Image: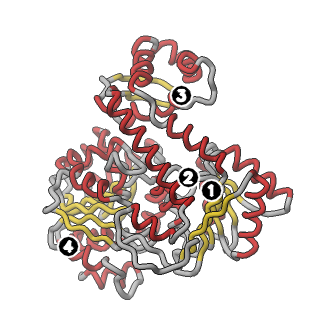
Amino acid sequence: MQPVQILKDRFGHERFRGQQRDVIERILEGGHALVIMPTGGGKSLCYQVPAIHLAAVQKGMTIVISPLIALMKDQVDALQRQNIRAAFINSSLSRDQREASYAHLAQGAYELLYVTPERFRKPEFLAALAAQKIALLAVDEAHCISQWGHDFRPDYTRLQEIREILGNPVTVALTATATSEVQQDIVRQLGLKETDIQLFHEGIDRPNLDLQVNPVWGMEEKRDQILQTRAHYQGPGIVYFSLIRSLEVMSEALEAQGIDHLIYHGKLNPRERRELQDKFMHSDDRLVLATNAFGMGIDKKNIRFVLHAEIPGSMESYYQEIGRAGRDQQPSLCLLLYDESDLATQMEFIQWSNPGADFCLRVYDYLKRDAEKIHAFGQEWLRDQLHFKNRHDFRLETVLQLFDRYGVIEGSLHPLRIERLQSLPPALTSPQERQAKLLRDQKKLHALLEYVKFDGDRKAFIHAYFGLPYHGSGSSS
């Protein structure tokens, strides 16, 4: 079956958009591709259509590596409704469900399989995968491959090794945001040369988005801006916060005004988060107050506004989040409320997410020396030893996550029970590397501050940041 027929019969679209056809032809000709498309531009079809074709012609399956567990379920549910043999295997499955999925995988039951890169650490997964022919590897959110990317995950640096495990299949990497440095690093981390991979870059412009920045002071002015935006833009909207406490204070203020809304943050349990997401997805005018935990996997076409009540930490994060507005191509507002006092929050976040080499070594020493006490008294005991009861220091959580992602520890983080301890990698013990990472994150925040204070065309600023030409196409102020 030809790609255009698959598009019509399986996905219900009459024609490809933008560079989709060119990307698909490149893949089916056996060539690697790096695809940069705006959020909502149809990146998924670039690997889903060839996956179905390759499963029929080559009897090979497609592995999709993605960091977004919520997005996996949504995409797999949509594919299964089209009678496409797709599945996901991740930590959201019970043990029995994972074992059943492994059995189906070993039997060749899937055309597409979605996994996180961490899944390749699991021997049982590799055993189930061993007999399968992999025709295509798709790496979604490919900026995660790069240490320069805004959402770096160390397991993404194993992509070259993973490609070798899979037999070095044709590979397509996809993202909405990547500076030229990140693009080069993606190619390198995949174990490819620039001459091996073709770049398809559709740019990042969304003409229907109105980019605005308004200076404010305090919660009352932020509340008034939210109310005005809500009144003017009829339809669903997202208001992003950096802190759960700020979100809760605003929620109380809106309740006092009789404004119906949802709240979404990482401290809610998975069932509550799923229910809230479903309410938002199935409504025509819901307002949600959320931390950046909300939005991963959200593909709602008619979001009329995305409002940042607190400044985000980087241009990449900001662009990803505003990209959730106006996917139906209708006019939509992207409003950033700038309160200078919010900068301190992001500066603290940067410090917490970039613990120094000495702190990493201290945590490692405690895990090695006091494992019994940690198992008996938990993470809070370890925090007290490290922070001297400073409850506002979250470097321990960051270090434990880094240890887990780099394979230093095996076991459970919640509760903290370490079953095996490996040696620390240079990336965590080198003061120079840790300082370089801190400096990169500080520069990202500084770039966003420059955007806030920029008095020209904000879309031109964003294009310049990502190293792209800009010819002017929409409103920004």
Q: CA distance from mark 2 to mark 4?
A: 36 Å
Q: Nearer the viewer, mark 4 or mark 1?
A: 1
Residue at 40 percent of width and 79 percent of height: 471
Would you say 160 lies left or right of 379 here? left
**Nearest to N terminus: mark 4 or mark 1:** 4
Circles 2 and 1, Cβ within 8 Å, touching? The answer is yes
Q: Which element is circle 2 on?
A: loop
Q: CA distance from mark 4 to mark 1?
A: 38 Å
Marking on residue 240: 1
Marking on residue 26: 4
Q: Residues within 10 Å of mark 2 (few under 14, many from 20)?
A: many
Q: Which element is circle 1 on?
A: strand
State the residue in front, 306 or 420: 306
Q: Which element is circle 3 on?
A: loop
Q: CA distance from mark 2 to mark 1?
A: 9 Å
Q: CA distance from mark 4 to mark 3?
A: 47 Å
**Nearest to N terminus: mark 2 or mark 3:** 2
Colour pattern: secondary structure
